[in-house]
Image: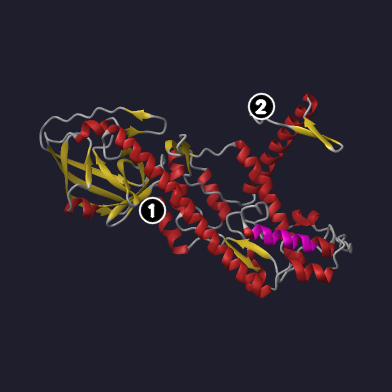
Amino acid sequence: HVIDGGHLSKSIACFEHNGARTRPASAQRRDEIEASIGWFYRLSLIMRKQRFDTGALSLHSVRLSFELDDAGQPVACQPYAIKDSNRLIEEFMLLANMSVAARIEASFPDSALLRRHAPPLERRLEDVCRQLAHAGIEIDTQSAGTISDSIRRISDADTRYTVEEMLTQPMQRAAYFSTHAIDDCAEYRHYALNAPLYTHFTSPIRRYADVIVHRLLEASLAVHGNHVTAEHALLPPYYSPFFPRTNATGSLTTAIHDSQSILVPAPELLAIMAHQCNLRKDAAKKAQDASSKLFLVNYLAATALRTGAPGVITQAIVTKVGENGISFVTPMFGVDGIIYMDRIADRKNQVVSADGRKWKLHLWSVKQASVTLVWTATPDPKDQLASKLSALVIDDTRHAVVGLQHNGAVETVTQTYRIFNKISVCIIPETSPPDLTVKLVMPSV
Protein backbone atom coordinates (compact mmCIF):
# COMPACT_ATOMS: atom_id res chain seq x y z
CA HIS A 1 0.00 0.00 0.00
CA VAL A 2 2.81 2.42 0.89
CA ILE A 3 4.64 1.47 -2.31
CA ASP A 4 1.59 2.59 -4.30
CA GLY A 5 1.61 5.99 -2.59
CA GLY A 6 -0.66 5.26 0.37
CA HIS A 7 0.00 5.50 4.08
CA LEU A 8 0.58 3.00 6.85
CA SER A 9 -2.68 1.87 8.38
CA LYS A 10 -3.22 3.11 11.90
CA SER A 11 -4.02 -0.48 12.85
CA ILE A 12 -0.39 -1.44 12.12
CA ALA A 13 1.70 -1.33 15.28
CA CYS A 14 4.75 0.90 14.83
CA PHE A 15 7.09 1.61 17.72
CA GLU A 16 10.06 3.82 18.45
CA HIS A 17 12.67 3.59 21.18
CA ASN A 18 13.26 6.25 23.77
CA GLY A 19 16.14 5.03 25.86
CA ALA A 20 14.98 1.87 27.60
CA ARG A 21 11.32 2.48 26.81
CA THR A 22 9.34 1.49 23.72
CA ARG A 23 6.27 3.49 22.75
CA PRO A 24 3.90 3.77 19.77
CA ALA A 25 5.49 5.66 16.91
CA SER A 26 4.61 9.30 16.50
CA ALA A 27 3.10 10.66 13.30
CA GLN A 28 6.52 12.02 12.33
CA ARG A 29 8.12 8.61 12.85
CA ARG A 30 5.44 6.92 10.74
CA ASP A 31 6.16 9.43 7.97
CA GLU A 32 9.84 8.57 8.20
CA ILE A 33 9.06 4.84 7.94
CA GLU A 34 6.89 5.44 4.86
CA ALA A 35 9.66 7.50 3.25
CA SER A 36 12.20 4.75 3.97
CA ILE A 37 9.94 2.12 2.39
CA GLY A 38 9.65 4.31 -0.70
CA TRP A 39 13.42 4.73 -0.93
CA PHE A 40 14.04 1.00 -0.51
CA TYR A 41 11.43 0.23 -3.17
CA ARG A 42 12.97 2.60 -5.72
CA LEU A 43 16.41 1.21 -4.96
CA SER A 44 15.12 -2.35 -5.39
CA LEU A 45 13.81 -1.47 -8.86
CA ILE A 46 17.30 -0.31 -9.87
CA MET A 47 18.88 -3.41 -8.38
CA ARG A 48 16.40 -5.72 -10.11
CA LYS A 49 16.94 -4.07 -13.49
CA GLN A 50 20.71 -4.28 -13.10
CA ARG A 51 20.47 -7.95 -12.11
CA PHE A 52 18.47 -8.93 -15.19
CA ASP A 53 20.48 -6.65 -17.47
CA THR A 54 23.59 -8.54 -16.39
CA GLY A 55 22.19 -11.99 -17.16
CA ALA A 56 19.85 -13.27 -14.42
CA LEU A 57 16.97 -15.63 -15.22
CA SER A 58 13.70 -16.11 -13.36
CA LEU A 59 11.16 -18.83 -14.25
CA HIS A 60 7.84 -18.77 -12.42
CA SER A 61 5.52 -21.70 -11.81
CA VAL A 62 2.04 -21.55 -10.34
CA ARG A 63 1.87 -21.55 -6.55
CA LEU A 64 -1.59 -21.91 -5.06
CA SER A 65 -3.05 -19.81 -2.27
CA PHE A 66 -6.00 -21.11 -0.27
CA GLU A 67 -8.62 -19.36 1.82
CA LEU A 68 -9.64 -21.50 4.79
CA ASP A 69 -12.82 -21.56 6.86
CA ASP A 70 -12.94 -21.78 10.65
CA ALA A 71 -12.52 -25.54 10.46
CA GLY A 72 -9.34 -25.23 8.39
CA GLN A 73 -10.95 -26.46 5.18
CA PRO A 74 -10.26 -24.69 1.85
CA VAL A 75 -13.18 -22.63 0.54
CA ALA A 76 -11.34 -20.68 -2.18
CA CYS A 77 -8.28 -21.26 -4.30
CA GLN A 78 -6.28 -19.01 -6.63
CA PRO A 79 -2.74 -18.65 -7.93
CA TYR A 80 -0.50 -16.81 -5.48
CA ALA A 81 0.08 -13.27 -6.72
CA ILE A 82 3.64 -11.92 -6.43
CA LYS A 83 3.49 -8.31 -5.24
CA ASP A 84 5.95 -5.43 -5.48
CA SER A 85 6.66 -5.84 -1.77
CA ASN A 86 7.76 -9.44 -2.44
CA ARG A 87 10.16 -8.24 -5.12
CA LEU A 88 11.52 -5.52 -2.83
CA ILE A 89 12.41 -8.07 -0.14
CA GLU A 90 13.78 -10.49 -2.73
CA GLU A 91 16.35 -8.03 -4.07
CA PHE A 92 17.87 -7.26 -0.68
CA MET A 93 17.71 -10.91 0.31
CA LEU A 94 19.67 -11.90 -2.81
CA LEU A 95 22.20 -9.14 -2.21
CA ALA A 96 22.74 -10.30 1.38
CA ASN A 97 23.13 -13.93 0.33
CA MET A 98 25.64 -13.11 -2.42
CA SER A 99 27.62 -10.77 -0.17
CA VAL A 100 27.88 -13.30 2.66
CA ALA A 101 28.79 -16.07 0.20
CA ALA A 102 31.69 -14.03 -1.10
CA ARG A 103 32.78 -13.14 2.43
CA ILE A 104 32.88 -16.67 3.85
CA GLU A 105 34.50 -18.12 0.71
CA ALA A 106 37.22 -15.50 0.86
CA SER A 107 37.83 -16.19 4.55
CA PHE A 108 37.59 -20.00 4.40
CA PRO A 109 38.13 -21.11 0.79
CA ASP A 110 38.27 -24.77 1.82
CA SER A 111 35.40 -24.74 4.34
CA ALA A 112 32.57 -22.58 3.00
CA LEU A 113 28.98 -23.77 2.59
CA LEU A 114 27.68 -22.36 -0.69
CA ARG A 115 24.77 -23.04 -3.03
CA ARG A 116 25.29 -23.74 -6.72
CA HIS A 117 22.92 -24.10 -9.64
CA ALA A 118 24.21 -26.15 -12.56
CA PRO A 119 23.26 -25.32 -16.18
CA PRO A 120 20.13 -27.01 -17.60
CA LEU A 121 20.23 -30.53 -18.99
CA GLU A 122 21.35 -29.99 -22.55
CA ARG A 123 19.32 -32.66 -24.37
CA ARG A 124 16.09 -31.77 -22.58
CA LEU A 125 16.65 -28.09 -23.26
CA GLU A 126 17.22 -28.81 -26.95
CA ASP A 127 13.99 -30.83 -27.06
CA VAL A 128 11.98 -27.99 -25.51
CA CYS A 129 13.53 -25.41 -27.84
CA ARG A 130 12.79 -27.61 -30.85
CA GLN A 131 9.12 -27.79 -29.84
CA LEU A 132 9.04 -24.02 -29.37
CA ALA A 133 10.73 -23.45 -32.73
CA HIS A 134 7.91 -25.37 -34.44
CA ALA A 135 5.53 -22.89 -32.81
CA GLY A 136 7.54 -19.93 -34.11
CA ILE A 137 9.36 -19.03 -30.87
CA GLU A 138 13.15 -18.99 -30.86
CA ILE A 139 15.02 -19.32 -27.56
CA ASP A 140 18.68 -18.33 -27.42
CA THR A 141 20.20 -20.87 -25.01
CA GLN A 142 23.72 -19.45 -24.94
CA SER A 143 23.33 -18.36 -21.31
CA ALA A 144 20.75 -17.72 -18.61
CA GLY A 145 20.69 -14.07 -19.70
CA THR A 146 19.95 -14.87 -23.34
CA ILE A 147 17.13 -17.21 -22.28
CA SER A 148 15.72 -14.41 -20.13
CA ASP A 149 15.96 -11.95 -23.04
CA SER A 150 14.14 -14.42 -25.31
CA ILE A 151 11.29 -14.74 -22.80
CA ARG A 152 11.00 -10.98 -22.35
CA ARG A 153 10.43 -10.55 -26.09
CA ILE A 154 7.19 -12.59 -25.85
CA SER A 155 4.33 -10.10 -25.54
CA ASP A 156 1.38 -12.46 -24.97
CA ALA A 157 1.01 -13.27 -21.26
CA ASP A 158 -0.39 -16.81 -21.74
CA THR A 159 2.36 -17.68 -24.21
CA ARG A 160 5.06 -16.29 -21.92
CA TYR A 161 3.65 -18.26 -18.98
CA THR A 162 3.63 -21.47 -21.03
CA VAL A 163 7.19 -20.94 -22.27
CA GLU A 164 8.40 -20.45 -18.69
CA GLU A 165 6.65 -23.66 -17.64
CA MET A 166 8.26 -25.55 -20.51
CA LEU A 167 11.73 -24.17 -19.79
CA THR A 168 11.44 -25.22 -16.15
CA GLN A 169 11.51 -28.89 -17.18
CA PRO A 170 15.21 -29.10 -18.22
CA MET A 171 16.42 -26.97 -15.32
CA GLN A 172 18.37 -28.70 -12.55
CA ARG A 173 17.77 -28.05 -8.87
CA ALA A 174 20.13 -25.83 -6.95
CA ALA A 175 22.19 -27.62 -4.31
CA TYR A 176 24.32 -26.89 -1.27
CA PHE A 177 27.98 -27.88 -1.42
CA SER A 178 31.21 -27.57 0.47
CA THR A 179 33.98 -25.73 -1.36
CA HIS A 180 36.26 -28.56 -0.24
CA ALA A 181 34.31 -30.98 -2.48
CA ILE A 182 34.66 -29.07 -5.78
CA ASP A 183 38.09 -28.28 -7.20
CA ASP A 184 37.06 -26.00 -10.07
CA CYS A 185 35.84 -22.62 -8.78
CA ALA A 186 33.94 -22.09 -12.05
CA GLU A 187 31.52 -24.79 -10.88
CA TYR A 188 30.56 -22.67 -7.86
CA ARG A 189 28.35 -20.51 -10.10
CA HIS A 190 24.62 -20.13 -9.69
CA TYR A 191 23.26 -20.44 -13.23
CA ALA A 192 19.87 -18.73 -12.84
CA LEU A 193 21.21 -15.82 -10.78
CA ASN A 194 24.32 -15.57 -12.98
CA ALA A 195 26.30 -15.12 -9.78
CA PRO A 196 29.80 -16.50 -9.15
CA LEU A 197 29.03 -17.15 -5.48
CA TYR A 198 25.77 -17.67 -3.64
CA THR A 199 24.56 -19.14 -0.37
CA HIS A 200 21.55 -19.14 1.97
CA PHE A 201 21.97 -16.70 4.84
CA THR A 202 18.67 -14.89 5.38
CA SER A 203 16.44 -17.60 6.93
CA PRO A 204 18.21 -19.24 9.90
CA ILE A 205 14.88 -19.73 11.72
CA ARG A 206 13.72 -22.28 9.12
CA ARG A 207 16.86 -23.65 7.40
CA TYR A 208 19.81 -25.30 9.10
CA ALA A 209 22.08 -24.37 6.19
CA ASP A 210 21.60 -20.71 7.10
CA VAL A 211 22.62 -21.46 10.70
CA ILE A 212 25.89 -22.95 9.45
CA VAL A 213 26.48 -19.91 7.24
CA HIS A 214 25.82 -17.56 10.18
CA ARG A 215 28.48 -19.40 12.17
CA LEU A 216 30.94 -19.15 9.27
CA LEU A 217 30.27 -15.42 9.00
CA GLU A 218 30.83 -15.00 12.74
CA ALA A 219 34.14 -16.82 12.46
CA SER A 220 35.09 -14.64 9.50
CA LEU A 221 34.39 -11.50 11.52
CA ALA A 222 36.49 -12.87 14.35
CA VAL A 223 39.38 -13.59 12.01
CA HIS A 224 39.30 -10.59 9.69
CA GLY A 225 37.15 -7.96 11.37
CA ASN A 226 34.97 -6.00 8.98
CA HIS A 227 37.15 -6.71 5.96
CA VAL A 228 39.03 -9.50 4.30
CA THR A 229 42.65 -9.17 3.39
CA ALA A 230 42.41 -9.03 -0.40
CA GLU A 231 40.04 -8.56 -3.30
CA HIS A 232 38.28 -11.72 -4.39
CA ALA A 233 39.51 -13.38 -7.57
CA LEU A 234 36.08 -14.80 -8.51
CA LEU A 235 34.17 -11.56 -8.36
CA PRO A 236 33.88 -8.88 -11.06
CA PRO A 237 35.14 -5.36 -10.30
CA TYR A 238 31.81 -3.98 -9.10
CA TYR A 239 32.02 -6.30 -6.09
CA SER A 240 35.34 -4.83 -4.94
CA PRO A 241 33.88 -2.37 -2.37
CA PHE A 242 32.98 -5.39 -0.26
CA PHE A 243 36.66 -6.37 -0.14
CA PRO A 244 38.93 -3.35 0.37
CA ARG A 245 42.57 -4.22 0.95
CA THR A 246 43.27 -4.04 4.65
CA ASN A 247 45.28 -5.75 7.32
CA ALA A 248 42.57 -5.27 9.95
CA THR A 249 42.39 -8.09 12.46
CA GLY A 250 39.34 -9.50 14.15
CA SER A 251 37.48 -7.30 16.57
CA LEU A 252 35.81 -10.09 18.58
CA THR A 253 37.28 -11.24 21.86
CA THR A 254 37.36 -14.91 20.83
CA ALA A 255 40.83 -15.98 19.74
CA ILE A 256 41.23 -16.63 16.04
CA HIS A 257 42.20 -20.26 16.54
CA ASP A 258 39.26 -20.86 18.86
CA SER A 259 36.82 -19.14 16.47
CA GLN A 260 37.77 -21.38 13.60
CA SER A 261 37.77 -24.57 15.64
CA ILE A 262 34.38 -23.81 17.22
CA LEU A 263 32.47 -22.24 14.33
CA VAL A 264 34.04 -23.68 11.14
CA PRO A 265 33.38 -27.39 10.53
CA ALA A 266 36.14 -29.58 9.18
CA PRO A 267 36.01 -29.69 5.34
CA GLU A 268 35.02 -33.37 5.23
CA LEU A 269 32.30 -32.83 7.84
CA LEU A 270 30.96 -29.78 6.00
CA ALA A 271 30.54 -31.88 2.84
CA ILE A 272 28.41 -34.36 4.81
CA MET A 273 26.36 -31.50 6.26
CA ALA A 274 25.79 -30.06 2.77
CA HIS A 275 24.54 -33.44 1.55
CA GLN A 276 22.15 -33.72 4.49
CA CYS A 277 20.86 -30.18 3.88
CA ASN A 278 20.14 -31.14 0.26
CA LEU A 279 18.19 -34.21 1.38
CA ARG A 280 16.13 -32.16 3.84
CA LYS A 281 15.56 -29.40 1.28
CA ASP A 282 14.25 -31.90 -1.28
CA ALA A 283 12.06 -33.57 1.35
CA ALA A 284 10.63 -30.20 2.39
CA LYS A 285 9.82 -29.38 -1.25
CA LYS A 286 8.02 -32.71 -1.68
CA ALA A 287 6.08 -32.14 1.55
CA GLN A 288 5.10 -28.64 0.40
CA ASP A 289 3.89 -29.95 -2.97
CA ALA A 290 1.97 -32.78 -1.31
CA SER A 291 0.33 -30.37 1.12
CA SER A 292 -0.74 -28.06 -1.71
CA LYS A 293 -2.12 -31.03 -3.65
CA LEU A 294 -4.05 -32.26 -0.59
CA PHE A 295 -5.71 -28.87 -0.08
CA LEU A 296 -6.52 -28.68 -3.81
CA VAL A 297 -8.09 -32.17 -3.73
CA ASN A 298 -10.21 -31.19 -0.71
CA TYR A 299 -11.29 -27.93 -2.36
CA LEU A 300 -12.25 -29.58 -5.66
CA ALA A 301 -14.00 -32.46 -3.86
CA ALA A 302 -16.13 -30.01 -1.87
CA THR A 303 -16.92 -28.06 -5.05
CA ALA A 304 -17.91 -31.22 -6.92
CA LEU A 305 -20.07 -32.40 -3.99
CA ARG A 306 -21.88 -29.08 -3.90
CA THR A 307 -22.73 -29.18 -7.62
CA GLY A 308 -23.27 -32.91 -8.10
CA ALA A 309 -20.66 -33.11 -10.88
CA PRO A 310 -17.64 -35.44 -10.65
CA GLY A 311 -15.06 -32.75 -11.25
CA VAL A 312 -14.24 -29.24 -12.33
CA ILE A 313 -13.72 -28.09 -15.90
CA THR A 314 -10.95 -25.59 -16.48
CA GLN A 315 -8.71 -24.32 -19.25
CA ALA A 316 -5.40 -25.98 -20.03
CA ILE A 317 -2.59 -25.02 -22.40
CA VAL A 318 -0.77 -27.56 -24.56
CA THR A 319 2.96 -27.58 -23.71
CA LYS A 320 4.17 -30.52 -25.79
CA VAL A 321 2.98 -32.84 -28.53
CA GLY A 322 4.48 -36.33 -28.43
CA GLU A 323 3.98 -39.55 -30.32
CA ASN A 324 1.58 -40.93 -27.71
CA GLY A 325 -0.04 -37.90 -26.16
CA ILE A 326 -0.20 -34.19 -25.44
CA SER A 327 1.28 -32.54 -22.37
CA PHE A 328 -0.60 -29.68 -20.73
CA VAL A 329 -0.62 -27.29 -17.78
CA THR A 330 -3.59 -25.55 -16.17
CA PRO A 331 -2.82 -21.89 -15.32
CA MET A 332 -5.65 -21.73 -12.80
CA PHE A 333 -4.52 -24.65 -10.63
CA GLY A 334 -0.94 -25.39 -11.71
CA VAL A 335 -1.90 -29.00 -12.50
CA ASP A 336 0.08 -30.57 -15.34
CA GLY A 337 0.10 -33.98 -17.00
CA ILE A 338 -0.21 -35.95 -20.23
CA ILE A 339 -3.35 -37.00 -22.10
CA TYR A 340 -2.57 -40.30 -23.86
CA MET A 341 -4.28 -40.86 -27.20
CA ASP A 342 -4.23 -44.67 -27.05
CA ARG A 343 -6.03 -44.67 -23.69
CA ILE A 344 -8.76 -42.43 -25.07
CA ALA A 345 -9.20 -44.71 -28.11
CA ASP A 346 -9.10 -48.05 -26.28
CA ARG A 347 -10.89 -47.39 -22.99
CA LYS A 348 -14.27 -46.09 -21.92
CA ASN A 349 -14.86 -43.04 -19.77
CA GLN A 350 -11.58 -41.40 -20.80
CA VAL A 351 -13.34 -38.36 -22.31
CA VAL A 352 -15.78 -36.13 -20.46
CA SER A 353 -18.67 -35.06 -22.65
CA ALA A 354 -19.86 -31.53 -22.06
CA ASP A 355 -22.75 -31.57 -24.55
CA GLY A 356 -24.58 -34.90 -23.95
CA ARG A 357 -22.90 -36.84 -26.77
CA LYS A 358 -20.61 -39.86 -26.72
CA TRP A 359 -17.19 -38.96 -28.10
CA LYS A 360 -15.16 -41.76 -29.69
CA LEU A 361 -11.60 -41.27 -30.90
CA HIS A 362 -10.90 -43.27 -34.08
CA LEU A 363 -7.67 -41.89 -35.52
CA TRP A 364 -4.82 -39.62 -34.55
CA SER A 365 -1.78 -38.48 -36.45
CA VAL A 366 1.32 -36.74 -35.08
CA LYS A 367 3.38 -34.54 -37.39
CA GLN A 368 6.19 -32.35 -36.09
CA ALA A 369 4.67 -30.42 -33.19
CA SER A 370 0.96 -31.03 -33.92
CA VAL A 371 -1.52 -33.87 -33.48
CA THR A 372 -4.71 -34.33 -35.52
CA LEU A 373 -7.61 -36.22 -33.93
CA VAL A 374 -10.64 -37.70 -35.73
CA TRP A 375 -13.74 -38.22 -33.55
CA THR A 376 -17.31 -39.36 -33.94
CA ALA A 377 -19.89 -37.70 -31.71
CA THR A 378 -23.09 -39.67 -31.10
CA PRO A 379 -26.13 -38.26 -29.24
CA ASP A 380 -26.70 -39.91 -25.87
CA PRO A 381 -30.15 -39.07 -24.43
CA LYS A 382 -29.29 -40.85 -21.15
CA ASP A 383 -26.38 -38.54 -20.41
CA GLN A 384 -27.40 -36.21 -17.59
CA LEU A 385 -23.85 -35.18 -16.81
CA ALA A 386 -23.54 -32.43 -19.40
CA SER A 387 -25.99 -30.10 -17.71
CA LYS A 388 -24.12 -30.42 -14.42
CA LEU A 389 -20.71 -29.92 -15.98
CA SER A 390 -21.84 -26.90 -17.95
CA ALA A 391 -22.42 -25.06 -14.67
CA LEU A 392 -19.01 -25.97 -13.33
CA VAL A 393 -16.62 -24.30 -15.74
CA ILE A 394 -14.01 -22.31 -13.86
CA ASP A 395 -12.05 -19.53 -15.54
CA ASP A 396 -9.42 -17.20 -14.10
CA THR A 397 -11.89 -15.08 -12.15
CA ARG A 398 -15.19 -16.83 -11.45
CA HIS A 399 -17.51 -19.76 -12.03
CA ALA A 400 -18.98 -19.28 -15.51
CA VAL A 401 -22.27 -20.90 -16.60
CA VAL A 402 -21.90 -22.33 -20.08
CA GLY A 403 -24.79 -23.80 -22.10
CA LEU A 404 -23.71 -26.35 -24.72
CA GLN A 405 -25.93 -27.45 -27.60
CA HIS A 406 -25.71 -29.98 -30.46
CA ASN A 407 -27.93 -30.70 -33.46
CA GLY A 408 -28.84 -34.28 -32.50
CA ALA A 409 -27.04 -35.96 -35.39
CA VAL A 410 -23.95 -38.17 -35.51
CA GLU A 411 -20.97 -36.05 -36.51
CA THR A 412 -17.38 -36.63 -37.50
CA VAL A 413 -15.16 -34.02 -35.88
CA THR A 414 -11.52 -33.36 -36.75
CA GLN A 415 -9.30 -31.38 -34.40
CA THR A 416 -5.65 -30.34 -34.53
CA TYR A 417 -3.72 -29.41 -31.39
CA ARG A 418 -0.42 -27.55 -31.30
CA ILE A 419 1.72 -26.03 -28.59
CA PHE A 420 -0.01 -23.04 -26.95
CA ASN A 421 -3.47 -24.23 -28.05
CA LYS A 422 -6.06 -24.01 -25.28
CA ILE A 423 -8.07 -27.09 -24.43
CA SER A 424 -10.68 -27.93 -21.81
CA VAL A 425 -9.96 -30.56 -19.18
CA CYS A 426 -11.93 -31.95 -16.28
CA ILE A 427 -10.01 -32.29 -13.00
CA ILE A 428 -11.54 -35.10 -10.95
CA PRO A 429 -10.55 -35.30 -7.27
CA GLU A 430 -10.03 -38.63 -5.55
CA THR A 431 -9.92 -38.39 -1.79
CA SER A 432 -8.62 -41.86 -0.82
CA PRO A 433 -5.73 -41.65 -1.40
CA PRO A 434 -5.65 -37.94 -2.32
CA ASP A 435 -5.05 -37.66 -6.04
CA LEU A 436 -6.20 -35.88 -9.18
CA THR A 437 -7.33 -37.43 -12.47
CA VAL A 438 -7.43 -35.20 -15.54
CA LYS A 439 -9.58 -36.04 -18.58
CA LEU A 440 -10.06 -34.25 -21.87
CA VAL A 441 -13.39 -32.46 -22.29
CA MET A 442 -15.17 -32.60 -25.63
CA PRO A 443 -16.06 -30.23 -27.06
CA SER A 444 -13.95 -27.49 -25.52
CA VAL A 445 -15.93 -24.97 -23.52
Whole-percent x, y for residue 423 in the image: 31, 41
Q: Is residue 303 left or right of residue 212?
A: left
Does the segment drawn in magenta span residue 144?
no
Q: Position of residue 334 (x, y in %)?
A: 42, 45
Quick one: label 1, few (<14), some, or many (20+) residues within 10 Å? many
Q: How many marks?
A: 2
Q: What is the x, y in percent for residue 304? A: 31, 37
How did the renderer colour the structure?
secondary structure
Camera-side residue of 420 and 257: 257
Counting from the top left corner in percent of width and height, residue 173 is at 52, 59
Name the quarter where the C terminus is drawn: top left
Q: Give the residue at mark 2.
A: 11
Left or right, 70 with reference to 236:
left
Q: Nearer the viewer, mark 2 or mark 1?
A: 2
Which quarter shows the N terminus? Answer: top right
What residue is shown at x 34% (from left), y 50% (from top)? 435
Q: Earlier in the sequence, mark 2 or mark 1?
A: 2
> Visible in this render: residue 233?
no
Q: Which amino acid type corresponds to the residue marked 2 in the rendered image?
A: Ser
**Residue underneath mark 1:** 131
Q: Are marks 2 and 1 in contact (CB under 8 Å)?
A: no
Which region shows up in magenta? Answer: 209-220
| Residue at far front of view | 71
Badge 2 crowding class, 10 Å Cα cut-off, few under 14, some 14 to 19, many 20 or more, is: few
Most common SS among magenta residues: helix
* Residue found 71% across the figure and 51% down from its top: 96
Q: CA distance from mark 2 to mark 1?
A: 52 Å
303 or 268, which lies in front? 303
**Circle 2: element type:** loop
Report if residue 422 is visible in the image: yes
Q: Which residue is located at x 28 percent, y 57 percent? A: 323
Q: Residue at x 62, y 68 (%)?
A: 273
